Image: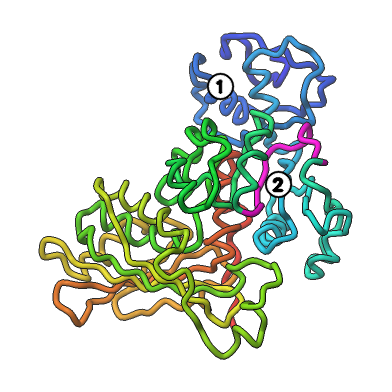
Amino acid sequence: CLLCPAIPLPELGWCVYISAAFGIRCITPATMQTIIAQSTSTPQLTNGASKGSSFHGKALKAASGRRCDVARSALKVSASAEKAKIAVLGASGYTGSEIVRLLAVHPSMEVSHLTAFSNAGKKFDTVYPQHRNLKGLPVLIKDDEVDYTDVDAVFCCLPHGTTQKIVAGLPADTKVVDLSADFRLRDPEMYKKWYGGPHAAVDLQKEVVYGLPELNREAVKKARVVANPGCYPTSVQLPLVPLLQAGLIKTEDIIIDAKSGVSGAGRSAKVNLLYSEIAEGMNSYGVGSHRHMPEIEQELSVAAGSDVHISFTPHLMPMARGMQSSIYVKLEGGATAADLRATLQAKYENEPFVQVLDEGEVPHTRFVRGSNMCSMAVFEDALPGRAIVLSCIDNLVKGASGQALQNMNLLLGFSETEGLMQQAMYP
């Protein structure tokens, strides 16, 4: 085999036309196992190797037109040769900055393009001085200036209503994680109702996967475009979906009292977000009409197998980041709070980013700050037949950029935890 002398051609069962001139380093049997595993018609090698990375090494794209399917797959594998090239669209917002922060310690990805609108032309560390120590970051450019021939995957951190056309126009082999709400609602009419305009990529919407990894991991792995869940929906679905699936709680009268740090409102200058407006107090917003309601109801309904409607009220808290959802549920069929806790502990026992606390322990936003963790707990309500579920996340990490990176790791075949094992920033 031209790829690696360690693999005889008879064992592969087909030819591989890849020239050393393409610059491909030696591909090990483990990596070849990945290439063959990605084929639909070729038998597996029996060396027990595990699947490896599968990002698009476009920098190695062959000039020849004689690439067979295996060659194409080989060009998507980079076990050690190079890092995946990542474009961050909308990098001047908080979620974009968080992506850059997390990628700074990622062993298998590197930033190749950063885009912005009003900040285009500026160095990234002039917009976010905390990143001055990151050398080699590209200058911010406009979205339409990105050269996607050298991009393996895209984090789309653009405002709602702007992402659909951009993602639909990307090369068909480019992996995308979209952090906006543009692809979260499967029904285009529902999107139009809640976001005030027609869906601009209805055909693409049909292939988009909703990306809550703990609940939809296998589908995410096979996707090209992933809709990253919203912050409130993440904090609500992680505890409620397993409970609905297990039939332990009733589908009606679910009350969600949620609180978020100010960074959830973005970085734009707004009067209601000024220090003197937000400090030393709290306020409700989007009462009965928050745009995360249909997203939450959509996913809870799928879990329950029937329509679920919620009472949801979010509140703005005088803190930069953090989120807690206090959820009040009715118990089904004689279930107890202990049953709910045991179900969640069993579900998430081996999940690296979800912790279900023991009886009597209370989750705090401060203990997940800066991390990709969701910390939850279950309490018996004073009212008979009810329980209280508490769920805490960092709205910018597990509620946005950290979960986006978790999804991207799955899309590109990397370990799901890469770049995400930072401990919470406390105090």
Which residue is drawn at the image coordinates 81% and 58% (left, top)? Answer: 118
Q: Secondary structure at mark 2?
A: strand
In-image side of 203 versus 419 (left or right) = left
Q: Of 370 and 50, which appears nearest the observer?
A: 370
Determine which of the numbered discs, if any, sits on residue 109 in the image.
2
Which residue is drawn at the image coordinates 63% and 34% (left, top)? Answer: 168
Which residue is drawn at the image coordinates 69% and 46% (left, top)? Answer: 108
Quadrant where the N terminus is found in the figure = top right
- For the residue carrying disc 2, how many other residues have a C-alpha within 10 Å: few (<14), some (14-19), or many (20+)? many
What amino acid is found at the position of numbered circle 2 in the picture?
Met
Q: Is residue 48 magenta?
A: no
Q: Is residue 158 magenta?
A: yes
Give the residues drawn in magenta, as a range: 145-159
Q: Position of residue 120 (x, y in %)?
A: 84, 54
Within the image, what quadrant is residue 134 found in? bottom right
Q: Position of residue 93 (x, y in %)?
A: 70, 61
Within the image, what quadrant is residue 332 found in? bottom left
- For the residue carrying disc 1, how many other residues have a C-alpha within 10 Å: few (<14), some (14-19), or many (20+)? many
Q: Which residue in the structure is indicated by mark 1?
A: 36
